[in-house]
Structures are given as structure tokens and as C-alpha cells.
Image (cartoon, rainbow, N blue to C red):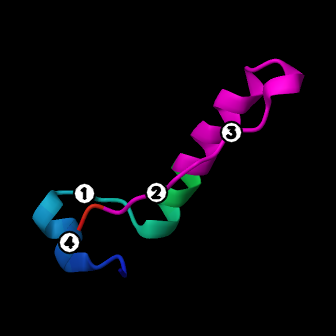
Amino acid sequence: MPWTDAADRRKGTVQDETGRLWDVLWMARSALAGMPRAHRRTPVSLHQDT
């Protein structure tokens, strides 16, 4: 489902889809970097609340 301005207004968010994806990927990377090297694989799922 596409990220829309109407959904942003309804939810009160001020971030675009690209910015939110960057944040999610950065946080996943940060979490993995703190793990021992042998455990640096983990599934990441993204869900958009519409």
C-alpha cells in the first residue's frame, strides 16, 4: 500500500516513506552491530499501519 499524505495527516506523522525506511534500517543495523559477530543475522519485517 502506498504511503500517502492523507495517511500522514490522519496519523499525525511528519516523516516521508524514505525517511521512515532509513530510520528502520539504521536501527536494525545498529542492533546487529552490537551483537557478537556469529549472531549478526536476523530477520527484519516491515509493516505499514494504514
Tag in front: 2 or 3: 3
Which stretch is magenta? 24-48
> Which residue was labeled with disc 1?
13
Which of pointers 1 and 3 lies earlier in the amino acid sequence?
1
Q: What kind of element bears circle 2?
A: helix
Of the residues shown, which amino acid type is indicated by label 1?
Answer: Thr
Please say if the residues under marks 1 and 4 sit with CB atoms less than 8 Å apart. Answer: yes
In the displayed orientation, state which residue is furthest to the right: 37
Q: Give neighbour class at mark 4: few <14, some 14-19, many 20+ (Cα, 10 Å).
A: few
Please say if the residues under marks 4 and 3 sit with CB atoms less than 8 Å apart. Answer: no
Q: Residue 20 in magenta?
A: no
Q: In which quadrant is the C terminus drawn?
A: bottom left
For the point 29% across and 59% down, which residue is it?
A: 14
Which of pointers 2 and 1 lies earlier in the amino acid sequence?
1
For the point 11% across and 66% down, which residue is it?
A: 10
Image location (x, y in percent) of residue 39: 80, 26
Relative to 45, residue 36 above or below: above
Q: Which mark is residue 20?
A: 2
> Which residue was labeled with disc 4?
7
Left or right of 24? Residue 38 is right
Relative to 29, residue 47 above or below: below
Of the residues shown, which amino acid type is indicated by label 2?
Answer: Arg
Relative depth, front residue between 6 and 2: 2
